[in-house]
Amino acid sequence: MDDKIREGSKKSGGSDDESGTSTETSDETLEEGGDLVAPGTPTDVDSSILHLSSAEREARGITDEEISEAFRSVLAHGSDEQKNLRGVTLPEITLDRATLRSVDRHPVDLSGSTIEGLSLEYSKVTLPFVLDEATIGSLRLAEAHVEAPISCSDATITGETDFFEAQFDGDVTFDGTTFEGPVNCDEVTFRDDVRFDGTVFDDEVTFRAAECYGDSNHLEDNTTFSGATFRADVSFRETEFGFTRFDDVACHDDAVFREATFTGDAEFGGADFAAEADFDEVRFEGDCRFDGAAFRGRATFRGGTFAGGARALIDDASFAGVTFDDDVSFRRASFRYVTFATAEFRGTAGFESATFAGDADFPDVSFDGAVDFDEGRFREDADFSGTRFEGPCAFRGCEFVGGANHLKDDVSFERSWFADDVDFHDTEISSANFTNVAFGGTVDCHGCVVTERIDIEARGIDDDAFVDFTRAKIRSGRIVQPTEGWVRYDLTLASIGDVDLEAERKRDHRQLLDYFRFCRTEFDEFDGHTFDFSGHREYLDRNAWTIHGFDEPTTDEFDPEYALEMTPEVVETTYLKAKQSAREVGDMKTAGEFRVKRQRYSRYKSLEAVRDSDAGVWTRTKNLGRAAENFFLGVTCGHGMRPMRIGITFAIAPLFFAFPYAFGGPLFETQAGQLGIGDLATADGLRVFYDNLYFSYISYTTIGYGDIGPMGPLARLLAGTEAYLSTILAALLVYALVKRSEL
């Protein structure tokens, strides 16, 4: 840095002749307190007393004022050689409210010096200073205007450092310096590069509302604190940075960057924040990188803006491999392209109402505590593949709308692990991938909307894994049950389109619907996308075509709360909608079976109304009639689905009337005669029974040949009843045959 300052001084100042004396002179070389110091020449300057030790000065009786006067003379008129003050020991030098000019631009080299204090408050400094490896009691430049470079590398400042409202136009270097006292850089302005690499700050540091532009450096960093150590509180609140490096910094106490602005790239890779890190309302207009950083205390990025630069192939914000040991909040933060790959969140993580305008990558991230993405907006693709959620996580009201690419899922949770409950309540998704996922609790997808498709292949960590799709809308997708650890899916009041239900092993397909519950589910809401039950006929036939409940729970702990009470009316509506779905896809067999199930629960609904003591007599009577009619149709022809049953009933019904005719006594006597039970063993007895059976059939078919007629009063009644019954059964047979033909 010393060489750089010397080279810069030659370029910006007058040219030196062979004797080393500048050809540029000034009539007024130094102002202090309004008084002019008389101009002189290098030959008038005596810098020898500045090289004496403190003991030598004391022995010669040289006062601090004389030393200060000699120092001022060297600043104003000293040659390059005279400004070489390396290793000197000086008392406190005060040049407040002065304008420091020199006859040349040679730097004042105080490398390795020991200075009790240096004060340039309210001064204008136009010549470079080199303070490398110096030991300084205090350094005060409050409201100073420093036009030339300053180098203070590997120095030690034992007292206060005050740069309040100072302005530095040239490079400023404090690499490797140790600040043992407090540092006040509030409202300071660095117009060129400033370096604090490897610097150690033992006391409180403040850069509040500072400006670190570094406009001359467009290729690298303008402000750099690489490897710096802050042992006490540090604040950069409301500070404006250009291209900045804070990589590998160590903050032992609270670090505040609240409302800071980074107009260029910001590098925080490997930073270590041992206490609270406050980045609330921070604005990164260029790319920022926190890769490998460690946040051991609470970290907040609430309301932060990660706008990113113009480069399209680099993430605008990168938190890859970051460790958050305590709680962290990105609430209402806005990102463009961001990655948190392999990051570890060991406390709670809050991303409520965060906006991701570009891709959001969270692959192989671990969340040990609760995580909250409520109301998050993902405008491009979101990748949570391989992520572990050990605590409860919430995505309530999130929007995963995806980008313009049609070959990639808009949100992917492939290979993710959810050890606790998950909340996707009212989430909007274009397309989602949940393949090879593990669920350990309840997955609440209540009101979730999938506008394109969702692919789920999830296994349960225990027997209580449960996905609640109540009131969800799923246009299309695929749900696969794994080899082991099946998951239950509740589709109460949901709307599903062409969703394929599969089992990973073919032999498990028969048990598939044991783990799916349809209750008042809509199957044909999406035009051209209707759910198809035809692939599950084997299961449905084995399970009496039941779809409104799960199988028996394997553990007593599985007792989820359902959105609807399983009343007969609810179940009836469920099978009505299932029937309509099957009819929509042309599966009339399944439609008919669901129709039978619907009629059964319609009867239960009528009987429930009959048992309602608060209902009126007429209402209860009507429902009793409906229940009786429903029961009769179910028994006789299976509500039109059992033509064989009604056919057999139609054929053998007269047989049952023959017995009272033959054995009922005088009240049932016909002209064929009557007999006792024992008479059936004789030929005459068989003839009498056959004649009564013959009479029953001709009465049943209303043929009535007249050769045999009823004699007893009840026989006449039964004969008329048979004729009426045959009409009803014939109509039912035709009804059943027509219904069957529709299949």
Image (cartoon, grey):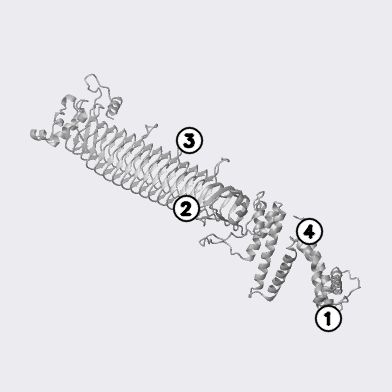
Residue denoted by label 3: 313
Please indicate whether residue 630 sits to the left or right of residue 309 in the image.
right
Which residue is the extreme one toward the front? 682
- The answer to whether mark 2 and mark 1 are in CB contact below 8 A is no
Foreground label between 3 and 2: 2
Q: Quadrant of residue 155?
A: top left
Specify the label residue 419 is tagged with.
2
Q: In the rendered structure, are the residues bearing label 3 and label 2 in contact, judged by CB atoms less than 8 Å apart?
A: no
Frontmost residue, 411 versus 116: 411
Earlier sequence position, callout 1 versus callout 3: 3
Q: CA distance from mark 4 to mark 1?
A: 43 Å
| Location of residue 304 in the rendering, given as x and y in whole percent from the top left corner | 42, 46
Secondary element at tag 1? helix
* Residue in front for this viewpoint, 129 or 114: 114
In the rendered structure, find residue 666 and report the number of the disc placed on it. 1
At numbered mark 4, what does the secondary structure look like: helix, strand or loop?
helix
Eye-nearest disc, 1 or 3: 1
Q: Quadrant of residue 493?
A: bottom right
In this figure, which residue is indicated by the disc labeled 4? 738
> Which residue lies most toward the top here?
18
